[in-house]
Image: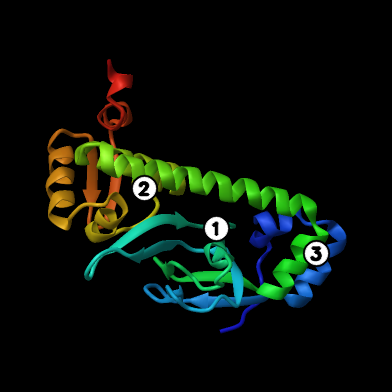
């Protein structure tokens, strides 16, 4: 479903780093689309036809991991770019992007995106920096899955989600995730997430209301994730 593009997109990396002279060209070549909660923006192994910038909403980036399992690599929200992992030599998406809530996106075709990068070196540099930071964070999380105890990984994940999405006025992390989503993000099982978050509640480190989780004692959670800071 096409719709007009709101002013919020001007805060995105695309508009922020393009030359002012190029912005009218973007406006002539963009397409705004709406994705319902639970629907994919693109699927793993789909051919790459373009890239997406989130206008409003939240998206999980995930891939198949073993039989019937998925691994969530990262989350994305307002202003961020998704679909860049499909820009390699094979030009297929190695991941799936699924809307966590009703989400509006700006889409530009691959050919126009490449033209935009060629004439906007500042944007190209900014995207390289963005890719490098995302890769560093993903590699760090993969190392933690191997070397960190699951209780620490869950504590760290809650803090990362808080930093990513912020807090609501009611004191909850501003994203609603199922326990299975959290398990797929941490690299563990639903049962383990349920047990550990229940323990955290008993210890009054967090609070919950349905799919909403709030952090009550940040420093203690950080100490579980990184024991060296609590010594």
Residue sitting at x 23%, y 52%: 209
Q: Secondary structure at mark 2?
A: loop
CB under 8 Å between discs 3 and 2: no
Q: What is the CA distance from the residue labelled 2 to the residue labelled 1?
A: 15 Å
Residue sitting at x 65%, y 56%: 12
Looking at the image, tell me whether mark 2 or mark 1 is earlier in sequence order. 1
Q: Secondary structure at mark 1?
A: loop
Q: From this viewpoint, which residue is outermost toward the bottom?
A: 1
Q: What is the CA distance from the residue labelled 3 to the residue labelled 2?
A: 34 Å
Looking at the image, tell me whether mark 3 or mark 2 is earlier in sequence order. 3
Residue sitting at x 75%, y 61%: 117
CB under 8 Å between discs 2 and 1: no
Residue 56 horizontal side relative to residue 181, left or right: right
Image quadrant assignment for residue 72: bottom left
The reply to whether residue 60 is in sight is yes
Nearer to us of marks 2 and 1 is 1
Residue 45 horizontal side relative to residue 210, left or right: right
The reply to whether residue 166 is in sight is no
- Which residue position holds label 3? 23
Q: Residues within 10 Å of mark 3 (few under 14, many from 20)?
A: some
- Which residue position holds label 2? 173
Q: Secondary structure at mark 3?
A: helix
């Amino acid at each position: 479903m096409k719709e007009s593009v709101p002013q919020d997109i001007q805060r995105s990396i695309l508009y922020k780093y393009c030359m002012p002279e190029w912005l009218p060209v973007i406006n002539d070549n963009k397409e705004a689309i709406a994705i319902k909660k639970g629907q994919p923006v693109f699927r793993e192994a789909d051919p790459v036809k373009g890239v997406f910038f989130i206008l409003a909403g939240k998206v999980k980036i995930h891939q198949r991991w073993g039989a019937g399992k998925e691994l969530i690599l990262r989350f994305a929200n307002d202003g961020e770019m998704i679909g860049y992992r499909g820009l390699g030599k094979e030009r297929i998406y190695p991941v799936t992007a699924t809307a966590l809530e009703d989400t509006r996106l700006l889409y530009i075709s691959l050919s126009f995106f490449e033209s935009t990068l060629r004439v906007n070196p500042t944007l190209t540099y900014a995207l390289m920096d963005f890719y490098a930071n995302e890769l560093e964070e993903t590699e760090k999380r993969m190392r933690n899955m191997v070397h960190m105890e699951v209780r620490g990984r869950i504590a760290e994940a809650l803090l990362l989600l808080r930093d990513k999405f912020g807090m609501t006025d009611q004191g909850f992390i501003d994203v609603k995730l199922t326990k299975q989503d959290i398990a797929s993000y941490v690299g563990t099982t639903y049962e383990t997430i349920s047990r550990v978050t229940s323990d955290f509640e008993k210890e009054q480190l967090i609070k919950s209301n349905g799919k909403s989780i709030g952090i009550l004692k940040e420093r203690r959670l950080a100490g579980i994730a990184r024991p060296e800071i609590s010594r």
